[in-house]
Image (cartoon, rainbow, N blue to C red):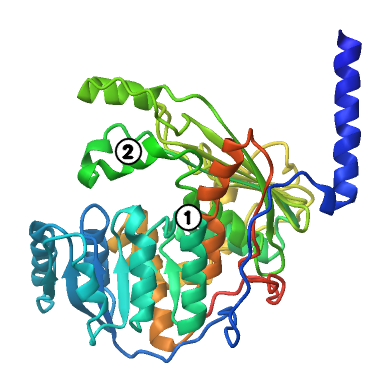
Amino acid sequence: MKKTALSLLAGYLLLFAGCVANKEEWPVIKTSEPERLQGQTDVLQLRAEPLSVVRIAFIGLGMRGPGAVERMTHIDGVEIVALCDVLQENTAKCNKILEERRFPSAQEFYGDTSVWRKVTALPDVDLIYVATDWKSHATIGIQAMKDGKHVAIEVPAAMTMDEIWALVNTSEQTRKHCIQLENCVYDFFELTTLNMVQQGLLGEIVHGEGAYIHGLQPFWNEYWNNWRMDYNHTHRGDVYPTHGLGPVCLAMNIHRGDRLNYLVSVDAKQISSLDFIKNNTGEDVKDFRNGEHTSTLISTEKGRSILIEHNVNSPRPYSRMYQLTGTKGFANKYPVQGYALDGIEIDSTIAANHENLNAHSFLPADVRTALMQRYKHPIAKSIEEKARQVGGHGGMDFIMDYRLIYCLQKGLPLDMDVYDLAEWCSLIPLTELSLNNSSAPVEIPDFTRGNWNKLNGLKFAE
């Protein structure tokens, strides 16, 4: 019996080796990559006309919107023109924020789920800031660009491949910025680690890990009309991948010298959400689609690997994992924050007794602190104190908003572009496709359509 099993394994490995030798023969589920229309070009490093004052309209003022409104009042050169939500109480609450911050009152739009259309059509708006439920993100973003506005969309910005391609095409056609509001790339640890990577401290990055592990039991009932639980009820896969994937992709220069190639996804059976629904509604659900825990492995064109996990069900401490494995070092955010370095000379200003440092354990806390101070990202240096004061997940939300407005005012390329949005959101439909086909490998499209190595690495405009 053992011999048979070993023979089968050996045969499988030989088959896999043959597939690797000839990518055209891989048993990968192919995905479509629509051609650009004639005259349509990419928006890599897109620059728009500088805006000395950025006039903003907010659509969606439930859980995330009010915080964004308040943060924007701390940035010079911002006017808040319009506030839009289904509920009048939410627009009124945000106008109260403006009043307290001594800003002029904004126009209020409310009453139904289609009132947003009046907002994107306003003539005196430069930027539409979308913080509605997931399923309306892309629809609003597409129309906003067609109406001549730049658009910033909360995560995830798109849920289907059709929505993703529509956002890419509309941005390319209108030459308007379309950014996903991925705050985790601006976390102080992630920014510092990104700078370390770009300075070569970790060597070549060969593997990365990210996750969204966050038991949502205390929050499920706060989502308007139960939209988030309903989405998990009817969809399978990693439906919220961008917090974990975004920082890893930036560190790996995805579509800036490398690209995501294919993925494989597996999940565990659902238990906790079924119990939650039963305990809160009495309903005995039989058709809940999303798993308790979803794990996705990704391979890149240049041979790197990425592991992304999703679990909003189990009683676990919050974690985005965020790990980078390099040829000279290792970075880790959760559950223990630290760095391990191998063969790296650390000068005496960082560590007086550094001769015993090695990669078999994390750097001592004082050395880590000094190292992070040395490699603090230029963006964080310029805005850290104010970001911590204003807040928003420890300050990273404010840095995200500040950088968005700064680049719009200066006419600079944004830190993230519509291709980042597309790549990170593509896990939502593609993991479901893999799971629905017994965890088959699924191709990840090149959303730049051939220009993934046009740029030489990630560069934030300064």
Secondary structure at badge 1 equals: loop
**Which residue position is annotated with label 2?**
229
* Residue 370 seen in this snapshot: no
Mark 1: few/some/many CA within 10 Å (<14, 14-19, 20+): some
| Numbered disc in front, either 2 or 1 | 1
Q: Residue at x 89, y 41 (%)?
A: 17
Q: Position of residue 8 (x, y in %)?
A: 87, 22
Q: Position of residue 51 (x, y in %)?
A: 35, 89
- Which quadrant of the rendered structure holds the N terminus? top right
Image-based side of 90 in relation to 148, left or right: left
Image-based side of 42 in relation to 341, left or right: left
The first of marks 2 and 1 along the sequence is 1
* Residue type of the residue flagged with mark 1: Thr
From mark 2 to mark 1, how far is it between C-alphas? 18 Å
Total numbered labels placed on residues in the image: 2
Q: Residue at x 36, y 27 (%)?
A: 273
Image-based side of 355 in relation to 390, left or right: right
**Which residue position is annotated with label 1?**
160
